[in-house]
Amino acid sequence: MAVSSGEGKAAPDRRRASEHAGEQGLLFDAEVSSPPEDVGYRGPTACAAAGITYRQLDYWARTGLVTPSVRSAQGSGSQRLYGFRDVLVLKVVKRLLDTGVSLQQIRTAVTHLRDRGVRDLAQITLMSDGVSVYECTSADEVVDLLQGGQGVFGIALGRVWQEVEGSLAELPGERALGDDDGGDAPHDELASRRRARKTG
């Protein structure tokens, strides 16, 4: 993934534009909360929050583009559980695909995003010209890309974070259980009823 830098290029026009972008507060000032790390979302829920089809989700998981970090599918009948960060990346992948970025460039971008801390993601804006994806962490870098003719559209991850957070607040999630809590069994009401029927 290409990374631009705005250091040492402070032209007066660029400075005015970056000050204006900073005043708007749209790209880099998103307030985000820390997502719970032990809560996962099943495939259909992840699809609904990210705006993708289950077929896309399954393909991306099988090819390693976006894999579930809370619990992977293990055998017949087991459910994948996607974490908040996974759903965020799924939504970003969908947006990049919709704007014509190649899957190869998206894979590079996703690998780069995986290496970032969860809180860091909210401070990033991804810019693209439809061919390459650029990471920008300041208004100066966005302006540099636009002046160079490279940036055509941008995805502010802080804004996507807020959208995903709002969607998931209205959708069912479940806590991932450790080995001492019954292994990989899903922790939900239906599973509890099934276990009670088997033992009772």
Image (tube, grey):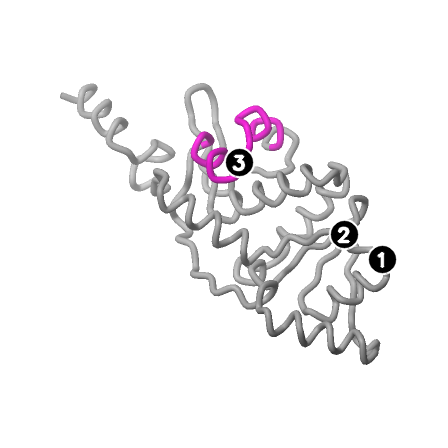
**Region of the chain picked out in magenta, as a range:** 43-60
Left/right of residue 139 with respect to residue 74 in the rendered view = right
Image quarter of residue 24: bottom right
Look at discs 2 and 3 and give the one toward the viewer: 2
144 or 37: nearer the eye? 144
Q: Quadrant of the C terminus?
A: top left
Q: Amino acid at mark 3?
A: Gly
Q: What residue is shown at x 59% (from left), y 32% (from top)?
A: 61
Return the x and y of residue 180 as percentages of the image width and height.
31, 41
Image quarter of residue 28: bottom right
114 or 90: nearer the eye? 90
Q: Which mark is residue 149?
A: 1
Residue at far left of view: 200
120 or 7: nearer the eye? 7
Disc on the earlier residue, 1 or 3: 3
Q: Which residue is mark 3?
A: 51
Image quarter of residue 95: top right
Q: Is residue 15 above or below residue 157?
A: below
Q: What residue is shown at x 83% (from left), y 76% (from top)?
A: 9
